[in-house]
Amino acid sequence: MSLLDKVYKKSDSIVSRKIADEFILVPIKQNVGDLESIYTLNEVATRVWGLIDGKKKVREIKDKIVEEFEVTPQEAEKDLTNLFKQLMAVGAIMNVQ
């Protein structure tokens, strides 16, 4: 199954917050924030994070990104593939389908 046909949800072990002009992800381990593993998201990644809801296919997220940012569908797919790999590697998202 292609990444574009998959659906992801946010992990319960990640807390997200907007602080000043930055959006950060903080892993939670045994109810304590792992402050040595804070991840900062850029503007596009922040928008993608907001679109991950456990219902939308990655294809739908890609279409929204192409619509809202100046990026080609091919660039968006490549960037989303990299972003989703990184988010999965740190345990921020999980596949639901």
Image (tube, rainbow, N blue to C red):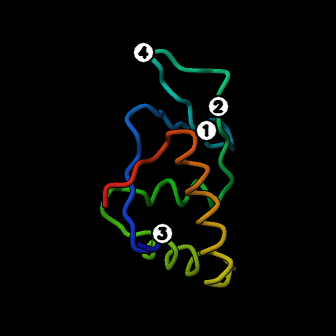
Mark 4 and mark 1 residues within 8 Å of each other at the beta carbon: no
Mark 2 and mark 1 residues within 8 Å of each other at the beta carbon: yes
State the CA–CA distance, disc 2 to disc 1.
Answer: 7 Å
Residue behind mark 1: 24
Residue at disc 1, secondary structure: strand
State the CA–CA distance, disc 4 to disc 3.
Answer: 31 Å
> Residue 61 vs residue 7: left or right?
right
Residue behind mark 3: 3
How far across and down, in percent of the image, does residue 74 sit? Answer: 65, 83
Q: Mark 2: which amino acid?
A: Ile
How far across and down, in percent of the image, does residue 58 sit? Answer: 45, 69
* Foreground tag (2 vs 1): 2
Between residues 89 and 32, which one lies in front from this camera angle?
89
Q: Which of marks 1 and 3 is nearer the N terminus?
A: 3
How far across and down, in percent of the image, does residue 4 sit? Answer: 46, 73
Number of other residues with Cα within 10 Å of mark 1, as a class: few under 14, some 14 to 19, many 20 or more: some
- Residue 38's label in the rendered image is 2
Residue behind mark 4: 30
The number of discs equals 4
* Foreground tag (4 vs 3): 3
